[in-house]
Amino acid sequence: MNRTAADPIHTFYNAHPYPPPVADLERARAQWREPNRARADYHQFWPDRPYRADIDILVAGCGTSQAARHAATRPEARVTGIDVSEASLKETQALKHKYKLDNLETELRAIEDAGELGRRFDLVVCTGVLHHLADPEAGLRALRSVLKPGGVLYLMLYAPYGRTGIYLLQDYCRRLGIGASRGEIAELVEAVEALPWQHPLRPVMEQSSDFLDPDALADALLNPRDRAYSVPQLFEALAANGLSFVRWYRQAPYLPQCGAIAQTAHAERIGKLDPAAQYAAMELWRGAMATHSLVVRRDDETGGAPIDLGGECWKGYVPIRLPSTACVAERLPPGAVGLLFNRNHWFHDLILPIGSTEKALFDAIDGDRTIGEVIERVGAAATEAARSFFKSLWAYDQVVFDASGPISGGIGRRLRV
């Protein structure tokens, strides 16, 4: 069966390629020239492996530019992009030729047929796609089958509660028989712009710079198929298809020790639940998650030990700041000299106040020094306080850790090998 031609999603995305095509990758390239950007990205997926630039990447459902962006920002990687939309692949090919991306290949292929590529990959990226498949679990199994040993799958799937406004408008469009012609989409834009401020779609619109783009609006409100996954449904789907959870790509919203919930008595109660139940509770408490972004791997993999700052090796970890982090010195609570936050967090309570010693520790992070070397440089005497601070930096998505080096010496110095 030719899935590509038979699926209505194929027709839809040929008419409405998404995301909106881009003509310029220079900004993305410039961002990736920042020191440690590539290492920070790598160690979100593999904290216990030495950094490698020459990895094999599959972008499954690559759209108009995602595979080209990966190839442009990771010139030593080998990138393959697949999609069911000829229109999207045409845009990707234009970027390939414009930027001479010899490390990029594309194929017209359904995700469910990824195994027919005859290749395996270190990293499979599938964001915003699986929930449009007729059988998302078949897609999961296909992507699992192309992972190399030690490979990981980076997923983004829709979440139900934050998409309430979208599902209301989808039903509205069905009741009115609104089609996907340019004229009908233009009328839909006008109706959406006139929504009352109380409508639950309003917050989604405010968080998306291109929501009213005709193709983006069609993708959200007129898509022939989508489904959303609550945290329990997501974990059930992973377990049923031979995959295991590694981490949330941005984890602070799911953790009871982060943000406003940490100041309540319920934080301790949530913290006593098993991790999956904690995440499910936090999804309900936050109430407005529109997507879940996570890293998973095959459930028969035994490597990839999670970060453990409670063990003996924590001083040998190398902290690397995530590029989306920032520190401000305005509207500070008593005793604080700065507020750390991650610009990619949607929830504004995820702010970490820091004192003068913590600020010195944070400023000493350069992507090369181990935690032990950072503590030694600052002269911080309270080791347990430092450990607690680095736990908070990790939980609040301020840093990732390179835990790949052998440890020796009294302060856990990481050997340069």
Image (cartoon, helix red, strand yellow):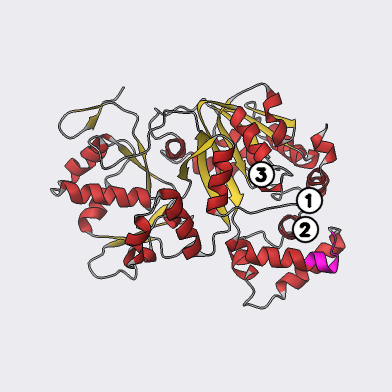
Closest to the camera, between mark 2 and mark 1, is 2
Q: Residue at x 81, y 49 (%)?
A: 12
Marks 2 & 1, CB-CB < 8 Å contact: yes
Marks 2 & 3, CB-CB < 8 Å contact: no
Q: Is residue 345 visible?
A: no
> What amino acid does circle 3 point to?
Leu
Residue identifier under label 2: 222
**Mark 2 and mark 3: Cα distance apart in space:** 17 Å
Q: Position of residue 201 (x, y in %)?
A: 64, 68
Q: Is residue 240 left or right of residue 223?
A: left
Q: Tell me the magenta residue range.
A: 173-179
170 in magenta: no
Q: Which mark is residue 130?
A: 3
N-terminal label among 2 and 1: 1
Closest to the camera, between mark 2 and mark 3, is 3
**Mark 3 and mark 1: Cα distance apart in space:** 18 Å
Q: Is residue 243 visible?
A: yes
- Rendered image quadrant of residue 403: top left
Residue nearest the observer in this picture, 53 or 150:
150
Rendered view: 172 above or below 340: below
Q: Is residue 160 left or right of residue 396?
A: right
Q: Position of residue 356 (x, y in %)?
A: 21, 58
Q: Residue at x 67, y 48 (%)?
A: 131
Circle 3 SS class: helix
Q: Residues within 10 Å of mark 3 (few under 14, many from 20)?
A: many
176 in magenta: yes
